[in-house]
């Protein structure tokens, strides 16, 4: 294990998030390697931690003032053993190659857990769409796709949205792909319903996160009814996590963005959630504006010098981090336990630091890693791909039922794998082992390629 980590860190010493993701998997799959000597002989760890292909390119575009801007574009095609590369595009100033590699690596095992025929990849750019006009976003997306289109396709690589890439961006990206390739295919998911999108796709990651949490609670003879929940973020995943919690009788008291968070002791209701959706999706405003509309809530600005996020200090039953990676640290985890939290389900990718994860698992909290809990988004992306291939559109109830069943199956798969390898109800171990075995077995079946 030490040799693998030395190799990974030695090749790319600056890619800390990627190291973190690899370390987590490597540590948990050691029992699998001990049982199967062929895995070591065939170098599966060395192979699965190295991308099959990394594409990096410049993205020149012109802003509304006529000034030329240049950003970097990335696509990491990590592993195609189970199907075409599948994973989102992220437009955010924090994006770099290490971030994209970590996301792509996580995506491989997440996609494996869905049982759908999808490999893993991820892409994006350090472009920031916030504050940009529609024209600027369109010109950037067209320039970005001007290079990316060479490397993707419905049977090769099917990107989707992620942070900073919503319906607007997917539309501009798809339009340029269609123009350049001269074909209308399901090469992107998260499309508008009018031209190939799937019902439930916008809701899928958030809904799936809550479905998984509900499955965990069911093992304890409990439900979300009456449970108080802390949710971070206020984008797509947080919005639909909140919506499904409300539908199942729970109470959401927090939402956040990069500037701070709101605490609404009364809890959000359907009317308040509609306002948040309009504020973030249409007006593109900041979460602090929530307290202007609902003055009983309290807004707290984020102090970057603090060693913790006070959002996680409020008393609650459940916590669902839905913002970004490493947003919950060791101090936050301790505060969650002090506040009575008994379940943590990750709506974002790797939102808890390793120290935080250790504290949560050691305390007996029901902890769901993102590669399992937030797999609903890519699962419905896979269903969108299937509908595109058949030129069909399934009704909302059918897609939602399929999503719920997929999350139920992922939950059972994690528990079964954890039990088989003596890890009890450790969902982290179960998710990593189950995803890993399926991917590496497919790799071995296909030979040394």
Image: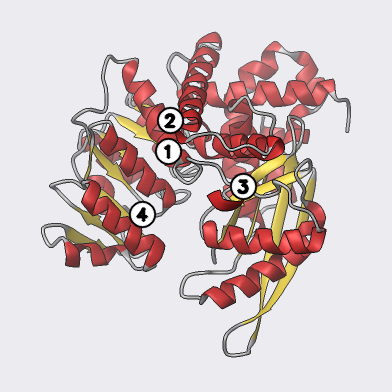
Mark 2 / mark 4, whichever is N-terminal: 4
- 163 shown above or below 238: below
Label 1 sits on a secondary structure element that is loop
Residue 213 in the image, given as x and y percentages of width and height: 37, 28
**Mark 2 falls on what kind of element?**
strand
Q: Which comes before the other along the chain, label 3 or label 2?
A: 3
| Residues at circles 2 and 4 in contact by the CB criterion of under 8 Å | no
Report which residue position mark 2 lands on: 368
Percent from the top left, x then y, of residue 151?
80, 53
| N-terminal-most mark, 3 or 4 | 3
Residue at 37% from the left image edge and 61% from the top image edge:
280
Q: From the viewer's perspective, is 155 left or right of 66?
A: right
Query: Is 441 located above or below residue 385 in the figure?
Result: above
Q: Which of the two discs, 3 and 2, sits closer to the camera?
A: 3
**Residue occupied by mark 4:** 234
Query: Considering only vertical position in the picture, is 128 above or below 68?
Result: above
> Answer yes or no: do the residues labelled 3 and 2 have beta carbons within 8 Å?
no
Q: Dot 3: what SS?
A: loop
2 or 4: mark nearer the eye: 4
Q: Which mark is residue 346?
A: 1
Gap in angstroms between the C-alphas marked 1 and 4: 14 Å
Q: Disc 3 marks which residue?
A: 196
The one of 443 and 331 positioned closer to us in this rendering: 443
Q: Residues within 10 Å of mark 1 (few under 14, many from 20)?
A: many
Q: CA distance from mark 3 to mark 1?
A: 29 Å
Contact, mark 2 vs mark 1 (Cβ under 8 Å): yes
Tell me the distance, in whole angstroms, between the alpha carbons under discs 2 and 4. 20 Å
Query: Mark 4: few, some, or many residues within 10 Å (few <14, many ≥20)?
Result: many
Pointer 3 or 1: first along the chain: 3
Which of disc 4 and disc 1 is earlier in sequence? Answer: 4
């Amino acid at each position: 294990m030490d040799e693998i980590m030395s190799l990974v860190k030695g090749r790319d010493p600056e890619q800390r998030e990627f190291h973190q993701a690899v370390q987590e998997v490597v540590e948990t799959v050691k029992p699998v390697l001990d049982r199967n000597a062929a895995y070591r002989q065939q170098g599966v760890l060395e192979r699965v931690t190295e991308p099959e292909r990394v594409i990096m390119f410049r993205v020149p575009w012109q802003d509304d003032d006529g000034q030329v801007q240049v950003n970097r574009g990335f696509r990491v095609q990590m592993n195609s053993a189970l199907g075409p590369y599948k994973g989102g595009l992220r437009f955010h100033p924090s994006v770099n190659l290490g971030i994209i590699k970590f996301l792509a690596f996580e995506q491989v095992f997440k996609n494996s857990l869905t049982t759908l025929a999808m490999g893993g990849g991820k892409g994006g750019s350090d472009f920031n769409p916030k504050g940009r006009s529609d024209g600027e976003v369109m010109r950037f997306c067209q320039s970005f796709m001007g290079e990316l289109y060479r490397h993707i396709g419905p049977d090769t690589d099917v990107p989707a949205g992620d942070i900073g890439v919503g319906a607007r961006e997917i539309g501009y990206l798809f339009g340029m792909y269609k123009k350049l390739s001269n074909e209308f295919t399901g090469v992107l998911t998260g499309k508008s319903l009018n031209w190939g999108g799937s019902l439930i796709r916008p809701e899928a990651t958030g809904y799936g996160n809550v479905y998984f949490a509900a499955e965990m609670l069911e093992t304890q003879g409990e439900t979300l009814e009456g449970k108080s929940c802390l949710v971070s973020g206020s984008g797509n995943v947080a919005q639909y996590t909140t919506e499904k919690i409300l539908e199942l009788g729970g109470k959401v008291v927090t939402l956040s963005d990069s500037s701070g968070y709101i605490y609404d002791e009364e809890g959000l209701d359907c009317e308040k959630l509609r306002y948040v959706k309009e504020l973030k999706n249409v007006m593109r405003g900041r979460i602090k504006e929530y307290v202007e509309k609902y003055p009983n809530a309290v807004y707290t600005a984020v102090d970057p010098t603090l060693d913790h996020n006070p959002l996680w200090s409020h008393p609650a039953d459940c916590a669902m981090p839905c913002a970004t990676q490493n947003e919950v640290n060791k101090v936050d985890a301790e505060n969650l336990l002090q506040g009575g939290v008994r379940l943590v389900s990750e709506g974002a990718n790797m939102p808890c630091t390793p120290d935080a994860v250790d504290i949560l698992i050691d305390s007996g909290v029901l902890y769901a890693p993102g590669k399992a809990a937030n797999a609903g988004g890519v699962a419905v992306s896979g269903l969108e791909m299937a509908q595109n291939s058949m030129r069909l559109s399934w009704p909302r109830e059918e897609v939602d039922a399929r999503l719920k069943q997929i999350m139920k199956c992922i939950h059972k798969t994690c528990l079964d794998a954890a039990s088989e390898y003596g890890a009890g109800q450790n969902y982290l171990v179960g998710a990593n082992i189950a995803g890993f075995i399926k991917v590496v077995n497919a790799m071995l079946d296909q030979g040394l390629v």
